[in-house]
Amino acid sequence: MQMYDLIQKTRRREPLTEEQIQWIVRGFCSGEIPDYMMSAWLMAVCCQGLTAAETAVLTLAMRDSGECLSMAPIGGVTVDKHSTGGIGDKTTLLLAPIAAACGGFVPKMSGRGLGFTGGTIDKLESIPGFCTSLQMEEFMRITKEVGCCVIAQSGNLVPADKKMYALRNLTATVDSIPLICASIMSKKLALGADCILLDVKFGHGAFMKTPEDAEHLAAAMVEVGKRAGRQCRAVLTDMNAPLGANIGNALEVLEVIRILRGEVRNDLSRLSLTLAAHMLSLSGRGTVEACYAQAQEALDSGKALEKFAAMTAAQGGDPRITEDPALLPQAAESYTAEAPENGYISSIQSEEVGLACLELGAGRTSSSSEIDYGAGVELHAFVGDAVQKGQPLFTVHGKTQELCRKAAARILQNIRITAEQPVPAPLLYKVIS
Ligand code: URA
């Protein structure tokens, strides 16, 4: 087989066989196919696409490039969730303990943040002592005993994706639905959960800018999940404004604790309940409506808070944060910005809020950057709210006043206040199953 011929076939939209795709993935992982040839093939995929069958074969070949786990030792139906990422998206921290409190099993591997979106692992690591790199036996034991456990991606899972993603990042080939689908689904399939819920976000603060693109990606991922024999469903959700009130690692954990304690109810709590309901229903626990009622009860009764504390303790973290959130890291300085005029908030550009948080030190600009866990933004007013001139709009937390004021100016420029009240967009746009 010649890589040259396969590049040309994909470039001409001639489908590759299963054997040819497996050969490409194996050859790239072993180093026999050099980066320049793989880059050319990735670019051909980016420009011409792959068929559904080719995408499924690519996903499975990538999955099989490393270790594949079995969740059988957990002894129950396991359910995983993936979000394509967004600003203030901390739903995993809520839905995992909510689903666990309803009897579900959620073994979850999550990522670190890079660029303007945060990573679940960084949020959890802002909890003093919380360990996200556990042995697989420990991961399974905690999931079985507590019902949920969240760890960082293991080094042995899907090495093909690590190598391919690094190349895609350098060659402008991240932005391809079959490649994103294969990258995400190979990792989900290698983890081995029985059911997979995909939260595909669209809008300013998301990978997919339009609902149409989000739907194409969601349909491709559900198709691959089904071909691989998993229960798989996708929900399309809005990411035009940040999710919830807080953005930044420890600030996001603080918001999660406030919701689990029943002190706050907002778009974040509603979306987390919806996602937990879909996860429970996928794993055979009733209709989505019945599972929503179970999830709501788990949240309102404090059972989900107990699960969050139990998971934190099991992973070495300090569970006292649920009683005394002041134990979480806090930034040295803060600055509160006020509304410059009367009106209604009609938009908050989430990508810009994410970039402001990155400048504050809440995220990474390279994989070796240090994170300031206390840095970030707390919104006090949301899209659709009426505001009066001088009313506090948001508070920025950071290392210095200079950093806080600079971030505040950037965010203020990206909050639109209008005379007309905007029509609220639904959080859940569509379900694809
Ligand atoms: N997230 C992934 O894991 N892979 C992609 O290709 C894009 C987003």
Image: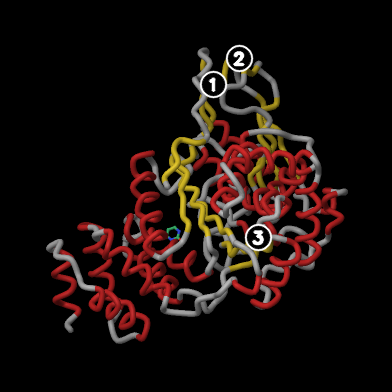
Compare residues 86 and 289 and report the one nearer the observer. Answer: 289
Q: Quadrant of the N terminus?
A: bottom left
Q: Is residue 122 above or below residue 132?
A: above
Residue appearing at x 49%, y 52% in the figure:
198
Residue marked by disc 2? 342
How far apart are the two marked residues, 3 and 1, measured between alpha carbons?
A: 43 Å
Crowding around mark 2 (Cα neighbors within 10 Å: few <14, some 14 to 19, many 20+) is some
**Residue 166 picture location, percent across and down:** 41, 69
Q: Earlier in the sequence, mark 1 or mark 2?
A: 2
Q: Is residue 399 visible?
A: no
Compare residues 377 and 300 and report the one nearer the observer. Answer: 300
| Front of the two marks 3 and 1 | 3
Whether the residues at callouts 1 and 2 have beta carbons within 8 Å, the answer is yes
Assign a secondary structure to mark 3: loop
Residue appearing at x 28%, y 82% in the figure:
33
> Which numbered marker is on residue 417?
1
Q: Is residue 17 visible?
A: yes
How far apart are the two marked residues, 3 and 2, measured between alpha carbons?
A: 48 Å
Assign a secondary structure to mark 1: strand
| Front of the two marks 3 and 2 | 3
Crowding around mark 1 (Cα neighbors within 10 Å: few <14, some 14 to 19, many 20+) is many
Assign a secondary structure to mark 2: loop
Crowding around mark 3 (Cα neighbors within 10 Å: few <14, some 14 to 19, many 20+) is many
**Residue 29 picture location, percent across and down:** 37, 81
* Three-letter amino acid code of the residue under disc 3: Phe
* Three-letter amino acid code of the residue under disc 1: Ile
Residue appearing at x 55%, y 55% in the figure:
81
* Three-letter amino acid code of the residue under disc 2: Asn
Q: Earlier in the sequence, mark 3 or mark 1?
A: 3
How far apart are the two marked residues, 1 and 2, measured between alpha carbons?
A: 8 Å
Residue marked by disc 3? 105
Residue appearing at x 33%, y 65% in the figure:
56
